[in-house]
Amino acid sequence: METDRLIEIFRTILAVQQETLAELKIIADRLNQFPSQASQTDEELMNHLQVQKYLDISKSTYYRKVKEGKLKPMKLPGGDKYYKQDLLAEYNESKRRGRI
């Protein structure tokens, strides 16, 4: 009697695990449809000093661009952070002006 109950519990657990695995596969397939978003989360974040160096701009220019809304930092513990991909417009502007 006790053995039959344990077998039934294990079968239930196995069924739940299989359903969960199937749902996880569906989620993984959906995430693979958006590779740019997935790769952005893997990309290393840049702090304001790295952004200044990357764009070849001064500290005052950096703060002016933030104030103007041209640079939009993510406010995180430890300071402002950026993805390099989000700096593309300002990078192209720096390149156009001959800074880079």
Image: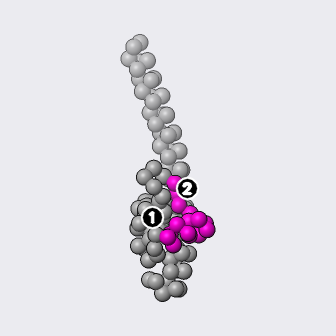
Q: Nearer the viewer, mark 1 or mark 2?
A: 1
* Mark 1 residue crowding within 10 angstroms, few (<14) / some (14–19) / many (20+): some
Q: Which residue is mark 1?
A: 48
Q: Would you identify the image quadrant in which residue 64 lies? A: bottom right
Type of amino acid at the residue the image marks with label 1: His
Residue displayed at 52% across by 66% down: 63
| Mark number, residue 63 | none
Where residue 43 appears, as percent x and y from the top left, is: 43, 63
Where residue 62 appears, as percent x and y from the top left, is: 50, 69
Residues rendered magenta in the picture: 60-75
Residue 27 or 86: which is nearer the viewer? Answer: 86
> Left or right: 64 with respect to 47?
right
5 above or below 93? above
Q: Which of the marked residues, 1 or 2, is nearer the chain's N terminus? A: 2
Q: Which residue is mark 2?
A: 30
Is residue 66 within the magenta segment? yes
Q: Would you identify the image quadrant in which residue 2 lies? A: top left
The residue lying furthest to the top in this view is 1
Q: Would you identify the image quadrant in which residue 65 lies? A: bottom right
> Left or right: 72 with respect to 50?
right
Q: Quadrant of the N terminus?
A: top left
Is residue 87 within the magenta segment? no
The residue lying furthest to the left in this view is 3
* Mark 2 residue crowding within 10 angstroms, few (<14) / some (14–19) / many (20+): few
